[in-house]
Image: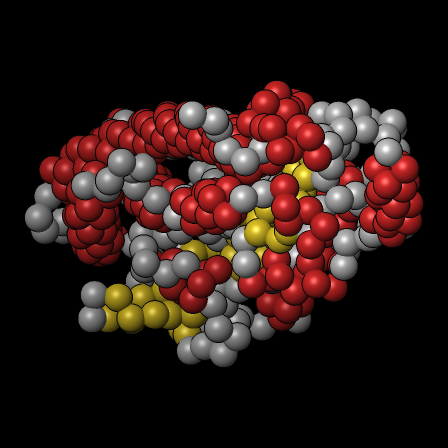
Amino acid sequence: MVKLIRAILLVLILTLGLFPAAAGAQPDLAEMVRVLSREDLYLEPTMAGRMSQADRQRLAAKAAELRGRGWTVKFALISRPPAGFQSLGEFTSELHRYLNLRDGLLIVASQNAVSAKTDRLGRGETQGLTDASRRVFTSEGYAAGMAYLADSIVAEAEAREAAGRTATGLLLGLGFLALVGLGAFLAVRLGSSRRARLKELQGWHAELTAAALEFDRVLGPAPTSARGRDGRRSLDLVLDHLVEVGSKLDRLGRAGLFGPKPRAMAEVARELQEARDRLAALADSLADEFPELKEVGLPDMLRPEAQPEAQFPLACFFCARPLRPDEAREVVLELGTERRRVVVDPEHYEALRRGEQPPVRTVEAGGRQVPWFEDPNFDPRRDYRPSYSGIGLPELLLLWGLFGHPVTVVATQPERTPQAESEPRDTWFESPLFGPPDVANEEAAESPLDFGAGPGDWAVESDFGDMGDVDVDAGFDGPHA
């Protein structure tokens, strides 16, 4: 009996002597990081007896299976959080960051808690799945609990990502359809507006062509007077010009969905306006000899929104220099029996005041030299050059015929000068018509189930109670037969 008592006391002394050492054991952090960097499972030596070889192989197989689905999964079984960490969740989050797992999954279990961390799932979702795994840990053991928790987190993350991709795809699809619809609407609307403008230009062209043909009938093929012959040549230029404009309109009519370009239509409109004004000037200049010309109707082509200065840019009668309204000077020149109001630039204005007769710029058109305003293709804004060659007013009088280019002549009726009261040809006067000369990732979740609420970027954890040696021996060596 005495021997039995001594044996019991010896066992108690040895047990009590060894317990403090076991109670004070801490995981080796350096060894844990080294192992998890190469392998998928770390077992703290003091916890090695709580997981059988079959359970270790089960976790290794689970990690390999999930790796095939694009997941990096690490498992760790330790006795307690290392010194310096308030909870297992805080330690798991820090270890996850140190291992640079990011979208990978880290599951760490201790004697009485489990924690998980992944960037592919939010804190709340991970916490709920970790709490749900406690029943598997307590009933089937560490390996079963870790495998169950890994499957649950991976399945939830993939389901949410698939739902997100579906929603994103749906939004992108709806956005694409909206953009296509808006583009189609704008294209149809823009094309419709441009085609309406083109139809308007085509109508003007048809009316101008009909008017020019009526002029052709009135003038005849060979007028007898010199002025009539000059008018005939000018009318031929207008008819040729209208044929060219008709070809341009045909090309514009073959434009695509968005219709013809506005710049091209603006150029055609300008050319049609020039043709109209040349016909109007021809009717004015030959009204006494061919009064029927005044009866030919011409289309009104001035759009309400257009400014007269933009439609009829001013240019110097002599040199074709483009002029602003504030620098244009209006004078009246006597040409034969007519007095015509024209605009000139300040330099030629002063030259006239000094009694000089500046030359009128000439250009080549139809194989002959004509005054610049007789060439329908001459645009002062585009073709003006400071230096030029020209003809004097006496020579111009011989070629007078048709005069009335819209960019330089003020739209007024020619003034008849009685022969008995004729003034010298250089008579002119000034008009004030143009005004005076000077003008982050979501934070890791943590559960207070084990150690209460705590600060920091902690992984979620769940407390499933103290799993002592007796429970481990009874329930964690794999399911019983």
Left-right relation of 350 to 143: right
Tell me if residue 142 can be seen: yes
Quadrant containing the N terminus in the rendered view: top right
Quadrant containing the C terminus in the rendered view: top left
Q: Position of residue 438 (x, y in %)?
A: 77, 55
Toward the viewer: 339 or 423?
A: 339
Taking the spot 48% from the left edge, 63% from the top edge, the residue there is: 320
Q: Position of residue 201 (x, y in %)?
A: 29, 34
Q: Is residue 147 above or below residue 40?
A: above
Taking the spot 64% from the left edge, 69% from the top edge, the residue there is: 347
Taking the spot 20% from the left edge, 71% from the top edge, the residue there is: 367
Left-right relation of 30 to 242: right
Toward the viewer: 16 or 412?
A: 16
Toward the viewer: 387 or 190?
A: 190
Total of numbered circles in the picture?
Answer: 0
Left-right relation of 136 to 462: left
Toward the viewer: 344 or 109?
A: 109
Q: Position of residue 429 (x, y in %)?
A: 62, 53
Q: Is residue 381 above or below residue 238?
A: below
Q: Is residue 62 above or below residue 342?
A: above
